Image: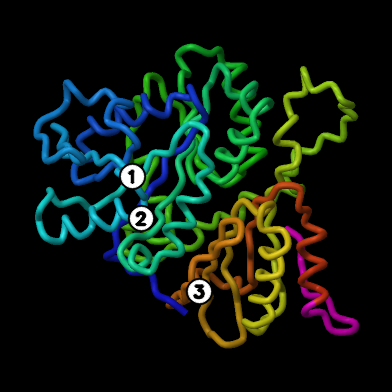
Amino acid sequence: MNKVEVDSLPVSVITGFLGSGKTTLLNRLIQHPHMAKTAVVINEFGEIGIDNMLVEHVDDNVVLMSSGCLCCTIRSDLVDTLKDLFKRRAKQEIPDFDRLVIETTGLADPAPILHTLMSDPFLMSRYRLDGVISTADAVLGVDTMAKHDEAVKQAAVADRVVITKVDMADDDAITTLEDRLRGLNPAAGIHRAANGDIDPELLFNAGLYDPETKSLDVQRWLRAEAYEDGHDHDNDHGDDHGDDHAHDVNRHDDQIQAYCVYLEERLPWDQVASWLELLTTYRGDDILRIKGMLNVAESETPVVVHGVQHMFHPPVQLDAWPDDDHRSRIVFITRGLSRDVVENMLTALTKKPGEGAIHEA
């Protein structure tokens, strides 16, 4: 099992559909004093209005903002860009930074970026995922999610959601969007912003490592209690919509399910690993995100797992249990993959005659 390198650099991914206010949010963030010593990786300098904020042109690829924020464009491959940034930081060729923010394009699925951070050995030892931040338009967000699956996925995998343009929408529209977002992703922190104005502290430090306590806070990260209201958050309202989706606001998100599975038994690691491997092998495209804290037979302390589709971050062993509840708990955010299928697959691998291993939240 691995240990989280607390001195590694936290990475936040900002995503959101075209026109959702993602660039406006980023423009405001890079001007904020709290963003000093932050490196922001973007596709093009021209996509954000930095001309009047430019202090120093470090080179063709990097500029330094008045706030102290460092902006870098992706020259070719993201892996190469992140490696180059880290090496140049170590050599003091660029100003020091202690946080990295990556902006995706408006149509991008954030999963490939998360896979990159989880799979490249150089990056895994020097960067750690802090969280995914997604933007949703207060005026058009509900309609966008009804028409575009990408917008639903971006909201479903997020750790933080920013509802933008709240100054342009009425309270009922904002409340409707908030309800939809909570149904998709019950544990995500949802915040409102007008003109991209928001305190960065609301968006960052969403990862397993809590800089406030300088420790691993699995309960804050996992937030399993958010799924314990007695239903699966599956957004399937049971309506027969037929073939006409013109007014079907649930067209793309009615298959998204968010639920927490509890395991009462202390299982061998190989059984749990086999279960997760089977799930990701056969249904990986439908597993948007997995977060879990496991009680395995080989360890007296919990093991934390985190996966996105087919890819898992190496498991992390905690130093102690956070409370007296030593059940394994695994949060799933899936598309078209029900709790029953997930649980039945585990039961087939672990259940002994006359015994049951699973407790539903």
Q: Residues within 10 Å of mark 3 (few under 14, many from 20)?
A: some
Residue sitting at x 60%, y 42%: 156
Q: Which residue has dot 3 on it? A: 321
Q: Which residue has dot 2 on it? A: 79
Question: Magenta includes 233?
Answer: no
Rounded to the nearest angstrom, the CA distance separating label 1 from label 3 is 31 Å
Select label 1 or label 3 by which is in front.
1
- Secondary structure, mark 3, is loop
Q: Which mark is residue 101?
A: 1
Q: Residue furthest front?
A: 76
Identify the magenta region.
Answer: 349-361
Select label 2 or label 1 by which is in front.
2
Rounded to the nearest angstrom, the CA distance separating label 3 from label 2 is 35 Å
Rounded to the nearest angstrom, the CA distance separating label 2 from label 1 is 14 Å
Query: In the image shown, does 158 or 60 lie closer to the viewer?
Result: 60
Select label 3 or label 2 by which is in front.
2
Q: Position of residue 346 (x, y in %)?
A: 76, 71
Q: Residues within 10 Å of mark 1 (few under 14, many from 20)?
A: many
Q: Is residue 265 left or right of residue 209?
A: right
Above or below: residue 85 compared with residue 149:
below
Mark 1: amino acid: Val
Query: In the image shown, does 47 or 336 lie closer to the viewer?
Result: 47
Mark 3: amino acid: Trp
- Secondary structure, mark 1, is strand
**Number of marks:** 3
Corner quadrant of residue 296: bottom right
- Secondary structure, mark 2, is helix
First-in-chain label (2 vs 1): 2
